Amino acid sequence: MANMNELKILVLNYLRNHEDGTILNISESTGQEYHNVANALLRCRRTQLIGHTKVKGGPRNRLRKVYSLKPKGQARLEWYQEQARKAQESVAPSEERPIEEKPRRKRRGVAE
């Protein structure tokens, strides 16, 4: 499972590319578990990044929630992408930043 921020970005990207979608559509398309997608959609809705409408349909003609991206969600997605780009640019190659090993602590009562 992706962490919640990655999942939120995944959901926002899906809605940007598909205009709208149900929990089932998003979970099948992204390969994420249904309940994880439902939680990500709930968090996005609480922060007003996405909206939903209830539509009758499906095999049992029941009400389903269809989610869509709001302008605030589009702006947030662009911000996430900008931050990711900046982070990628600021990472120096490994030759320039050697990794220093921490000195090992001596453990009490253990002979070496």
Image (cartoon, rainbow, N blue to C red):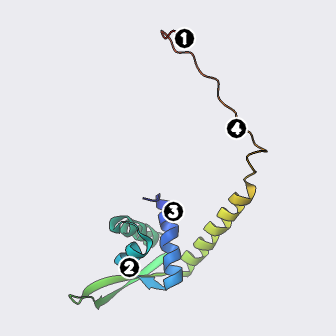
**Residue linked to disc 3:** 6
Q: Residue at the location (70% across, 37% down)?
A: 99
Specify which label sits upstream in the sequence, 2 or 1. Answer: 2
Q: Residue at the location (77% across, 44% down)?
A: 95
Q: Residue at the location (70% across, 33% down)?
A: 100
Side of 7 where 63 appears, left or right: left
**Residue linked to disc 4:** 99
On the question of residue 48 being in view, the answer is no
As measured in the structure, the alpha-carbon distance from the residue carrying label 4 to the one carrying label 3 is 27 Å
**Residue linked to disc 2:** 25
Q: Quadrant of residue 40?
A: bottom left
Furthest-left residue in this view = 60
Specify which label sits upstream in the sequence, 2 or 3. Answer: 3
Q: Position of residue 52 (x, y in %)?
A: 40, 82
Does residue 54 sit above or below 5 in this rendering? below
Q: Position of residue 96 (x, y in %)?
A: 79, 45
Of 38 and 72, the residue lying toward us: 38
**Which circle, 2 or 1, is nearer the viewer?**
1
Q: Position of residue 41 (x, y in %)?
A: 41, 71
- Label 3, secondary structure: give it: helix
